[in-house]
Image (cartoon, grey):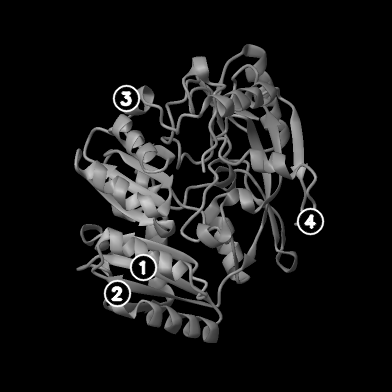
């Protein structure tokens, strides 16, 4: 283990355990980072020392025929995606790259960060999130104890829930050292249908109709007119765009695209976008490209009932200046406000419209320090989270304060 001023840079799992053991013995907390692409999500971590996992890198197992890949936690996600693409495979849940939204270069996220943040993308409606594809982990708890969970095959469920338990824990329970994911074949082709000019309410109805059909639509999103130009080099500029993605092998895609067109023929003009152009659109939606504007203007990520999302946004716009677009058929709302995060108002409106989870994913340092960035938990769930924290990290050594103030740091949330 090499140590710089207030920084540990391990290259092996044993060195990670040694660093945590040192921190535990000195009761001196650690900030856990990979390449820092998501470092500004959550409250500012209150730690004098850093555990930098960027040197803990490399794919350790890849068996394309078995649909399994293992890698050290600090391995860049971009490296893994390139390797999978060479073999016609993918992480089907298409994890988001937060870097551009948070003022960082693209492609700096790590595979460990994918699980720690439970990342997903527009295909979540069909494929789920990171927690639905994790097969096994190796990690070091805040007790400086190395442990493993799960295995390398899909049917091995020993400890599987513990692997899932790391999803969305944001480095507050344990330091991941190795992860094993299920991978899947990439689609032979894809087509995006863009319905033009719909208002939010009509777009919600159109997406629901398409997702409820037999067309097996894998993704559904809506960009209002003022944001349509901000995705994929402006190819959607000019009108609002309600986007439906159909994936699979050629004849099947063609048949299902025609089915959707017939189903929604009365909704207005429908543009058909295929291949790389379609992929660029969904990468833009995935990475919140409309709000990757180089500013610290507050951005919220809200999951809620798709049928209520546009009503919540309308209520917010009556009281604050806000831009919004929708993914997951409207079940995921991305909101950008002008200066004030309006946290009490946003969470009030989410509760009013059926409830959900609102996470402040971008804001200034002072705002993140002062506000509950993650959705506050109900008492029963908070108590369960506190017990889990005490089991894994009783001295609050790992990422203290990131998910809640230090005096309440055992009140952990699980990001969805």
In depth, the one of 179 and 257 nearer the eye is 257
**Secondary element at tag 3:** helix
Coordinates of residue 352 in the picture (x, y in percent): 35, 39
Q: Which residue is mark 1?
A: 206
Q: Which residue is mark 3?
A: 366
Left or right of residue 290, residue 132 in this image = right
**Secondary element at tag 2:** helix
Left or right of residue 344, residue 255 in this image = right
**Callout 2 crowding tier (Cα within 10 Å): few <14, some 14–19, many ≥20:** some
For residue 90, which quarter of the picture?
A: bottom right
Q: Which of the marked residues, 2 or 3, is nearer the chain's N terminus? A: 2
Cα separation between marks 2 and 3: 45 Å
Q: Nearer the viewer, mark 3 or mark 1?
A: 1
Cα separation between marks 4 and 3: 46 Å
Which disc is residue 155 wearing?
4
Which disc is residue 267 wearing?
2
Q: Residue at x 55, y 50 (%)?
A: 76
Q: Are marks 1 and 4 in contact (CB under 8 Å)?
A: no
Q: Is 263 rendered above or below residue 222? A: below
Q: Nearer the viewer, mark 4 or mark 3?
A: 4
Which disc is residue 39 wearing?
none
Q: Residue at x 59, y 57 (%)?
A: 80
**Callout 3 crowding tier (Cα within 10 Å): few <14, some 14–19, many ≥20:** few
Q: Residue at x 45, y 82 (%)?
A: 259
**Secondary element at tag 1:** helix
Cα separation between marks 3 and 1: 40 Å
In depth, the one of 292 and 222 nearer the eye is 222
Coordinates of residue 399 in the picture (x, y in percent): 54, 26
Q: Nearer the viewer, mark 1 or mark 4?
A: 1
């Amino acid at each position: 283990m090499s140590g710089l001023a207030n920084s540990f840079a391990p290259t092996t799992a044993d060195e990670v355990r040694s660093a945590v053991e040192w921190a535990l013995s000195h009761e001196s907390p650690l900030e856990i980072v990979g390449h820092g692409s998501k470092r500004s999500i959550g409250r500012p971590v209150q730690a004098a020392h850093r555990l930098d996992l960027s040197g803990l890198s490399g794919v350790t197992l890849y068996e394309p025929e078995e649909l399994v890949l293992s890698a050290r936690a600090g391995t860049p996600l971009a490296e893994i995606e390139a390797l999978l693409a060479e073999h016609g495979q993918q992480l089907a849940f298409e994890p988001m790259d937060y870097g551009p939204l948070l003022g960082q270069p693209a492609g700096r996220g790590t595979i460990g960060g994918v699980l720690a943040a439970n990342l997903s993308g527009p295909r979540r409606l069909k494929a789920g999130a990171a927690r639905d594809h994790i097969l096994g982990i190796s990690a070091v708890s805040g007790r400086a104890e190395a442990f493993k969970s799960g295995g390398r095959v899909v049917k091995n469920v020993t400890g599987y829930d513990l692997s899932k338990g790391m999803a969305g824990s944001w480095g507050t329970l344990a330091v991941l050292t190795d992860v094993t994911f299920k991978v899947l074949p990439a689609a032979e082709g894809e087509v995006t249908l863009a319905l033009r000019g719909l208002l939010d309410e009509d777009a919600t109805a159109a997406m629901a109709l398409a997702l409820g059909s037999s067309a097996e639509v894998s993704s559904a999103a809506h960009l209002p007119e003022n944001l349509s130009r901000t995705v994929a080099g402006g190819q959607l500029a000019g009108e609002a765009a309600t986007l439906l993605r159909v994936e699979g092998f050629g004849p099947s895609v063609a048949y299902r695209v025609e089915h959707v067109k017939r189903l929604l023929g009365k909704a207005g003009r429908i543009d058909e976008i295929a291949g790389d152009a379609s992929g660029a659109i969904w990468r833009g939606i995935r990475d919140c490209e409309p709000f990757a504007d180089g500013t610290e203007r507050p951005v919220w990520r809200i999951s809620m009932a798709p049928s209520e999302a546009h009503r919540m946004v309308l209520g917010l716009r009556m009281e604050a200046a806000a831009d919004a677009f929708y993914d997951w058929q409207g079940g995921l709302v991305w909101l950008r406000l002008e200066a004030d995060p309006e946290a009490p108002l946003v969470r009030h409106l989410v509760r009013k419209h059926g409830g959900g989870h609102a996470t402040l994913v971008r804001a200034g340092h002072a705002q993140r320090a002062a506000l509950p960035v993650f959705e506050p938990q109900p008492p029963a769930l908070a108590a369960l989270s506190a017990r889990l924290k005490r089991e894994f990290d009783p001295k609050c050594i790992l990422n203290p304060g990131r998910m809640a103030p230090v005096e309440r740091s055992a009140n952990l949330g699980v990001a969805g």
